[in-house]
Amino acid sequence: MSHIRVVPEMHLILDPTTGVIAEEKDDVVEYSLDAVKTQLDELDNIVTDMMNQLDPRAKLLSMFPGRESASYNAGIITNVFYGAIIGFIVSFLLLTVTKLGGM
């Protein structure tokens, strides 16, 4: 919790989140959550990156610029390659079966 000392001689502080001016007290414990917020922001970026890994066109945290659709293009090329291999195997089997059946 951050605050601004408005009048240090009179121990007046301003809470910028609420806009309230109050008297500073010694028996109140204050703890700054700025370090926790920084860590939560970093974790939020990591979670967003993990969700973006499900989309092949999304930009990832450690990706070089201009490589947003690299996974998408690699998937297309891989599927075309496997499709061609399976197509060649099936056509080879059909040719050998028809050739053996014609003898």
Image (cartoon, rainbow, N blue to C red):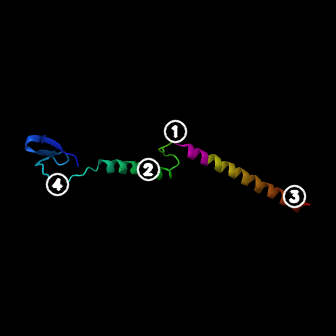
Mark 1 is on which residue type? Answer: Phe
Q: Position of residue 63 (x, y in %)?
A: 51, 42
Secondary structure under badge 2?
A: helix
Name the residue beneath numbered marker 3.
99
Asked whether residue 6 is drawn in magenta, I would say no
Question: Tag 2 or tag 3, which sits nearer the N-term?
Answer: 2
What residue is drawn where x is 16% and y is 54%? 28
Q: For marks 4 and 2, give the CA distance.
A: 35 Å
Q: Position of residue 71 (x, y in %)?
A: 56, 46
Q: Residue furthest right?
A: 103
Mark 2 is on which residue type? Answer: Ile
Work out whether 18 lies above or below 94. Answer: above
Per the rendering, the mark at residue 64 is: 1
Secondary structure under badge 3?
A: helix
Q: Residues within 10 Å of mark 2 (few under 14, many from 20)?
A: some
Name the residue beneath numbered marker 4.
28
Question: Tag 1 or tag 2, which sits nearer the N-term?
Answer: 2
Name the residue beneath numbered marker 2.
46
Q: Residues within 10 Å of mark 3 (few under 14, many from 20)?
A: few
Q: Residue furthest front?
A: 26
